[in-house]
Every structure is written in C-alpha cells, then in structure tokens.
Image (cartoon, rainbow, N blue to C red):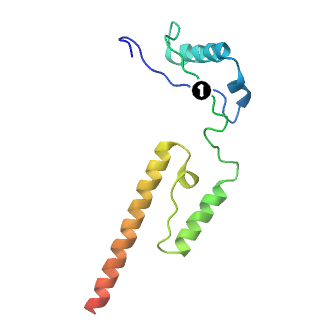
Amino acid sequence: MPSGHVTVTNYIGGARAPHLAESDLETLINLTMHDLRVLLGIKGVPTFVHHALFRHAIPQYDVGYGRFKDLMTEIEQSAPGLFFAGHYRDGVALSDSIVSGDNAAKKVNAFVTAAIANHESSLAA
C-alpha cells in the first residue's frame, strides 16, 4: 500500500437492501464514498478499487431463531458431554465463531476435569 493511504473494506446490500449490491461499480463507489464522508470525514477518491459480489456471503438469522438456540441449550443440558459450537450457535461473524469455539473448549475442559475428579474420588472410596 502506498504511503499515506489506508485500506477500507465496505459491504453494500445485505438482507435489508440486497438490490444495492447489484448496482453498477460507479454507483457502488459513489454510495460508499458518500457514507465514508458522512461517517469518517474521508475526502478525495479511491486510489484503488477492488469489487467482488457475493450473493450469499453472510447468512442472517431469521426472526425466531432464538428458539433453536434455546433448544440447543436444552439438548446440551440433557446430554452431558454434548456441546454445540459454531456459527449456528453463537453468531455468524468469524469472531463469533472463534468465541464460540473457545467457550465450547472451556465447557469440554470443565466437563472432563469434573469427570476425572469424580472418577478419582470413586476410586478413593
């Protein structure tokens, strides 16, 4: 990247306005630059532009998806040692998936640690 420049990634469209993503490149650049001026005070025009269209890039939970998350929690509670993790459990962003995996690893560790402690105490009895 040239000195004095920054890289900015923008997303246009999404579940609420999918038609915007189908706009021509000039329109997309104009929309993006307008928003960047308003939000960040950016002036000027882009030096480089890379455009990629992903029609189904980031999934969205449907209204009511919380009931499935509640069901997963109920299943975990009724089946000790079974743990759900991933996008469908804790969020669609990459960071959500990482946090979900970390949380699952902590649950697994606690489960195994408790099982070992129970086994050792039963041997001592």
As drawn, is 123 to the left or to the right of 70? Answer: left
Q: Say few, some or many: other residues with alpha carbon within 10 Å of mark 1 (under 14 / 14 to 19 / 20 or more).
A: few
Name which residue lies at 38% across and 61% down. 106
Name which residue lies at 61% across and 15% down. 29
Quarter of the figure that contains the N terminus = top left
Horizontal and vertical percent position of residue 84:
52, 62
Task: Name the one closer to the observer, 38 or 124.
Answer: 124
Q: Farthest left residue?
A: 124
As drawn, is 6 to the left or to the right of 23? Answer: left
As drawn, is 113 to the left or to the right of 60? Answer: left
Horizontal and vertical percent position of residue 8:
48, 22
Q: Farthest top residue?
A: 44
As drawn, is 105 to the left or to the right of 58? Answer: left
Horizontal and vertical percent position of residue 71:
62, 65
Looking at the image, is 110 positioned above or below residue 92? below
Residue 31 in which image quadrant: top right
Residue where numbered disc 1 is placed: 52
Name which residue lies at 61% across and 62% down. 70
Q: Secondary structure at mark 1?
A: loop
Looking at the image, is 111 positioned above or below residue 119? above
Q: What's the residue type where badge 1 is placed?
A: Ala
Looking at the image, is 73 positioned above or below residue 41? below
Looking at the image, is 49 positioned above or below residue 81? above
Name which residue lies at 58% across and 68% down. 74
Quarter of the figure that contains the C terminus = bottom left
Marks counted in the figure total 1
Q: Farthest bottom residue?
A: 125
